[in-house]
Amino acid sequence: MQKAWFYEEFGPKEVLKLGDLPIPSPKPNQLLVQVHAAALNPIDSKLRQNPLAPIDLPVVPGCDMAGVVVAKGEDIKKFKVGDEVYGNIQNFKENMLKQLGTLAEFILVEENLVAIKPKNLSLLEAASLPVAVQTAVEGFKTAGFEEGQSAFIVGGAGGVGTVAFQIAKKLYNASLVVATTSTGKVEFVKSLGADKVVDYTKTRYEEIEEKYDLVYDTIGDSRNSYVVAKEDAPVIDITWPPSNPRALHSGLTVSGEILEKLRTYLESGKLRAVVDPTGPFSFYDVIKAFGYLETGRARGKIVVSFCSAPFRINGFCNTKMALNSEKLH
Ligand SMILES: NC(=O)c1ccc[n+]([C@@H]2O[C@H](COP(=O)([O-])OP(=O)(O)OC[C@H]3O[C@@H](n4cnc5c(N)ncnc54)[C@H](OP(=O)(O)O)[C@@H]3O)[C@@H](O)[C@H]2O)c1
C-alpha cells in the first residue's frame, strides 16, 4: 500500500483526505514512478471544486511530478529503473484524466509523457516545470510569435507567467518583454529577467504608451489587457472562457518531448525553475499548500516535497521513515 491524498466528493480543499491506496502495477506502456516532488496547479483546485471532466471518485489530484522510475512495463524503451524523470501526467486534451494523480507516493505514467530530469535541477525544481512550460510554449505557438518580437505578459509572477517571459526572452530572443505584477513582486519579476515590470496597482493598461506584438494574459483579464496589443497583434488568454472575444484561447499539449527539447536551455541555466519560497510544503501539508495556491498570490510554482534528503537511500525515498519523521514535527 502507499500513502496518497484523495477526495471522494467534489468541494473545498477540506474534502482532501490522506489515506492508503494500493500501489498500482504498470501496463506494458507505463512506468511506475516513486514521486519525490509534485507541483500544484490551479486546475487541480478547479477539478476538485467541480466535476469539469468525466472521472470516477475517489480522485488523487495532481498533474506535475518528478521522481524515480521503480518499475516499468515490457514495452518501455526509453527509460530504465532508477532514472530520474519529470512530467505532467494528465492528458487534458484527450479528456483522459487519471484517477491516480501526482499527490501519491507512486504513480503510473506513459513513457511519452515524461522526460529525464535536467542534471542541474533538483527533483523539486523539475516538478515545478511541466504544466507551466507546456502552457507557455503552446501559447507562443498559438500566437505565431516570432524571433525578436515584443511581448506583454499579464501575471508575470505566477506559475505560468514566470516561465512565459523567460521563454519569450531565451527561446525567441524577444526584443522587449514586459510583465505585470503587484508592488511587492516587482523586484522578484525583474530578477527573473523581465525587461520592464508594470505594477498593476499603480498603472492602468490605458496609461501604457508602447504597443506590443503579443499580449499573453495568464489571469483572464484580456477584456482589459488587449489595449496594449498592436493593432492586429494576437491576444492570448489561457483562462477559459477568455473574457474578450478578440482573444485566442491557448491550452497545452501534454508531452515529454517538449521538456526534452528544453533540456539544453534548462541545463545551461538559460531557463530557470521558479519554486515559490513559501514552500516547499511537506507531503503532510497538502491542504495548507492548496490553501496558499487558492489565495491566487503564488510566486512561481508551489511545490510539495515527498522526501527530504536524509530519507533518500541510493536515490530512492524511504517514504515510511520520511513520513514518520514529518509526523514528529
Ligand atoms: N489553458 C491552459 O492550458 C492553462 C494551463 C495552466 C494554467 N491555466 C490557467 O491560467 C491561470 C494562471 O495559472 P498559474 O498557474 O500561473 O496561476 P498562479 O500561479 O496561481 O497565479 C498567481 C499569480 O497571479 C498573479 N495575479 C493575480 N491577479 C493579477 C493581476 N490582476 N495582474 C497581474 N498578476 C496577477 C499574482 O500576482 P500578484 O500577487 O502580484 O497579483 C500571482 O503571482 C489559472 O486560471 C490556470 O487555471 C491554464
Image: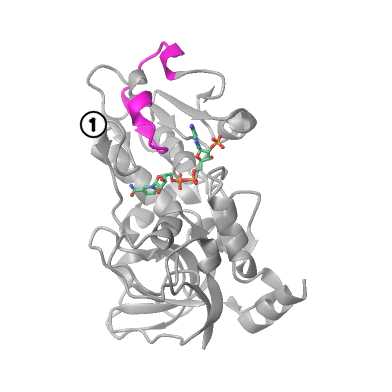
Tell me which residue sits at (32%, 21%) in the image.
229
Which quadrant holds residue 143?
A: top left
Q: Residue 246 placed where, x, y %?
A: 23, 28
Q: Which residues are magenta?
A: 205-224
- From what the image shows, is residue 270 above or below residue 87? above
Q: Residue 186 placed where, x, y %?
A: 60, 29
Which quadrant holds residue 173?
A: top left
Mark 1 near ligand 1 (CB under 8 Å)? Answer: no
Q: In the image, 229: left or right of 17?
A: left
- From what the image shows, is residue 212 above or below residue 53? above
Q: Secondary structure at mark 1?
A: loop
> Can residue 231 be seen here?
yes
Furthest toward the right, the residue is: 329
Closer to us: 18 or 22: 18
- From what the image shows, is residue 68 above or below residue 281? below
> Can residue 150 be seen here?
no
Closer to us: 238 or 108: 238
Tell me which residue sits at (49%, 65%) in the image.
66
Which quadrant holds residue 324?
A: bottom right
Tell me which residue sits at (35%, 47%) in the image.
135
Give the amino acid at mark 1.
Answer: Pro
Q: Residue 125 placed where, x, y %?
A: 55, 56
Q: In the image, 253: left or right of 128?
A: left
**Colour scheme of the rendered structure:** one colour
Q: Residue 86 placed where, x, y %?
A: 44, 64
Q: Is residue 58 a member of the stretch shown in magenta? A: no
- From what the image shows, is residue 208 above or below residue 57? above
Q: Which quarter of the rendering shows the C terminus?
A: bottom right
Q: How many marks?
A: 1
Q: In the image, 63: left or right of 186?
A: left
Q: State the residue position of label 1.
A: 245
